[in-house]
Image (cartoon, rainbow, N blue to C red):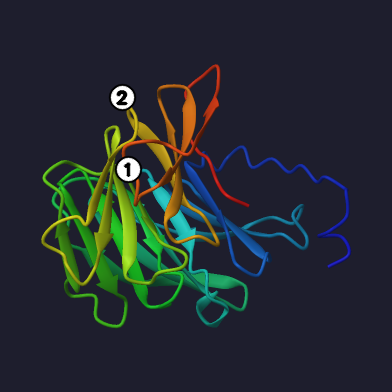
Amino acid sequence: MAARWSSENVVVEFRDAQATAMSVDCLGQHAVLSGRRFLYVVNLEAPSEAPRKISRQSKWDVGTVQWNPHKTEAHLFAASSNQRVDLYVWHDGSGEPHTSLQGHTRVISDLDWSWFEPEFLVTSSVDTYIYIWDTRDTRKPTVALSAVAGASQVKWNRRNHYCLASSHDGDVRIWDKRKPNTAVEYVAAHLSKIHGLDWHPDNEYILATSSQDNSVRFWDYRQPRKYLDILSCQVPVWKARYT
């Protein structure tokens, strides 16, 4: 733990991985790098050790990968490729595929684990649907949100376990999973595509959006017509995250 909180920087290169996505587990012990042929799990306590490989059978690159954020399920991570999400189990230094979620008809753009219910995962797609999955029964999604337009991002609210947000080009839709037929609020956030979306960790009404239009904007979705604040940048912003 002393090493983890020191000012020392450790730089390790994995040139053969050709990774397209990365995630660190909630315990700060492992990172997963997703390549086309293998998933590489790196031990962050000893990052210069050779990573462990998990073979994957897909001709598609991984679009997004994310460990489960709950300590009880910290051994589980999800990786999306094309129209499918694969769940993997990591145990005693080795990993294996657990199950697959298949329901989307176009490429999956994003996925996010619930902050409240460790079994719940949401996926968004170009096919205009946002699906909420219960990993205890993966045959079909438990909730389907129809957005009319394809979604590029989806994120669970960190304070309200019914609430989530999705981005569609420059717009944001706020959803209540108990009312799947229509979004509860609509924010015309940017004139260009939104690349990143993140909820405030302590306030359930506030979120940040980052966009192709060179800005990060902060919103209270109860007042959707005017942003709270803006960070202007010189280049498009791909990700913005609350810490």
Say which of 101 and 127 sits in front: 127
Q: Can the viewer see residue 243 in this picture?
A: yes
**Residue 217 pos. (x, y %):** 46, 35
Instruction: Answer left or right for 141 relative to 223.
Output: left
Q: Nearer the viewer, residue 24 or 241?
A: 241
Q: Residue at x 25, y 59 (%)?
A: 175
Residue drawn at (41%, 49%), measured in percent from left and top?
64
Q: Is residue 58 visible?
A: no
Instruction: From the viewer's side, name the closer residue of 219 and 178.
Output: 219
The span from disc 1 to disc 2 (Cα, nearest Å) is 15 Å
Which mark is nearer the camera, 1 or 2? 1
Q: Position of residue 5 (x, y in %)?
A: 83, 59
* Mark 1: secondary structure: loop
Q: Name the image quarter holding residue 29.
A: bottom right
How packed mark 2 is, by other alpha carbons closer than 10 Å (few <14, some 14-19, many 20 or more), is few
Q: Earlier in the sequence, mark 1 or mark 2?
A: 2
Image disc number at residue 191: 2
Q: Give, as a three-letter code, the residue at label 1.
A: Pro
Secondary structure at badge 2 equals: loop
Q: Dot 1, how many residues are within 10 Å of its Cα: few (below 14), some (14-19), or many (20+)?
A: some
Is residue 89 left or right of 189 when viewed as pictured? Answer: right
User: Which residue is identified by label 1?
Assistant: 224
Q: Position of residue 183 (x, y in %)?
A: 19, 55
Q: How many marks?
A: 2
Which of these two is toward me, 167 or 160? 160
Q: Is residue 198 above or below residue 5?
A: above
Q: Residue at x 53, y 40 (%)?
A: 240
User: Mark 1 and 2 residues: CB-CB less than 8 Å, in contact?
Assistant: no
Residue type marked 2: Leu
In the visual, does 78 lie left or right of 177?
A: right
Q: Position of residue 140 (x, y in %)?
A: 16, 72
